[in-house]
Amino acid sequence: MMDWMEFPHRRWNPLTGDWVLVSPQRTRRPWQGRVEPAPAQSQPAFDPQCYLCPGNHRTGGAKNPIYTGAFVFDNDFAALLPGAAPLEFDRGRLLAARAERGICRVVCFSPDHSLTLPRMGVAEIRGVVDTWIEQCRELSRRPEIGYVQIFENRGELMGCSNPHPHGQIWAGETLPTVWRKEQAAQAEYRSTRGACLLCDYLALERQSERVVCENDSFVALVPFWAVWPFEILMVSRRHCPSLETLADAEQNDLSEIMKQITIRYDNLFETSFPYTMGFHQRPTDGAAHEEWHLHAHYCPPLLRSATIPKFMVGYELLAEPQRDLTPESAAARLRELSPRHYLDSR
Ligand code: H2U
Ligand code: ZN
């Protein structure tokens, strides 16, 4: 029998309803594209020019306190504002616009400019998790906030302007596109099958070739429908809707698995691995949202080396995302890497 995984096929993403084209037969095609310069590796623990380091002035004029753990401030150049003027624009149901209120914050993960999540201790990462949870609690109490998007953009390749370890929080009024798709898919699954989509997916993936690493509370895997070469989906084992509802031990396990994932990423090409990661969790409209299952997506751009990213261009922009490396091969490569950071192994 021919192995269908060796031939071009499309895979379905049950969380969004989108498809991805997989072309495993192309993995050996020659590469003559552009080579990115390797980004600078080592950073000082304090950078007098950095607008996120303790005690420094930000571009907006404010001065950071001498903070010692995680530190949050309102983004000086926020994309969303709490008091946007009301607007309902509709021209022939063809041109439509709505006002959108919200709050944007920056979360410094550590006062140490030279660190990254994989180089931080689990207890320090737990401090970041605690800060995220406090932020979710505070923001979700506001009537104008409908969801809280926590994310990290890491590396120049991802357009991140500053190597100081930090992430962002954008909390808005109206569920954005990806959240809306995931909510609809999870609600539909629950109403037609009486079960949770991600609980059922995790059960199918138990000991599968797509699992990268796991602990008592979380599983990290390259999803069957991954778009980015080394994309990871991190899912809580327990059916749990949000960061806020994680038990204390689960919050520690979250900190630990984030370290495991990012160590493996750094080890893959022995570089500070760029990515966008972020959490998806229950909206904050006050409803129970039994359908929601907490998870995080890691979307890294690198394909072949520290300097060669995958470009989402051509067919991907116009038709559908496509990948050559199978999710199974990507997971095998990540799984076989050392759980010890390469800079600690030298
Ligand atoms: P990046 O993760 O994309 O580098 O974002 C850093 C954020 O920090 C960015 O959203 C904000 C930018 O608006 N920022 C401030 O809030 N104050 C500053 O003084 C500089 C940058
Ligand atoms: Zn700094």
Image (tube, rainbow, N blue to C red):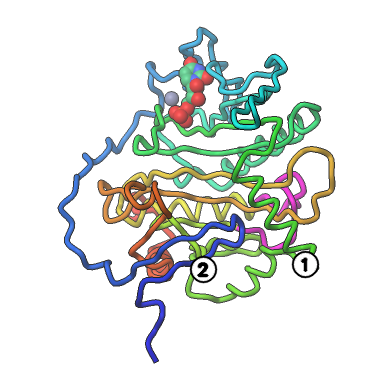
Q: Nearer the viewer, mark 1 or mark 2?
A: 1
Mark 2, residue position: 211
Mark 1 closeness class: few <14, some 14–19, many ≥20 residues within 10 Å: few
Residue drawn at point x = 70 percent, y = 55 percent? 293
Question: Total number of numbered labels?
Answer: 2
Q: Nearer the viewer, residue 16 or 208?
A: 16
Q: Amino acid at mark 2?
A: Val
Q: Amino acid at mark 1?
A: Thr
Residue drawn at point x = 61 percent, y = 20 percent? 74
Q: Is mark 2 within 8 Å of ligand 1?
A: no
In the image, is residue 67 part of the stretch drawn in magenta? no
Residue 199 locus on image (x, y percent): 69, 66
Residue 325 locus on image (x, y percent): 34, 65
Side (left or right) of 238 relative to 227: right
Q: Earlier in the sequence, mark 1 or mark 2?
A: 1
Magenta region, residue range = 235-252
Q: Can you name the residue that lies furthest to the top here?
A: 61
In the image, is residue 246 part of the stretch drawn in magenta? yes
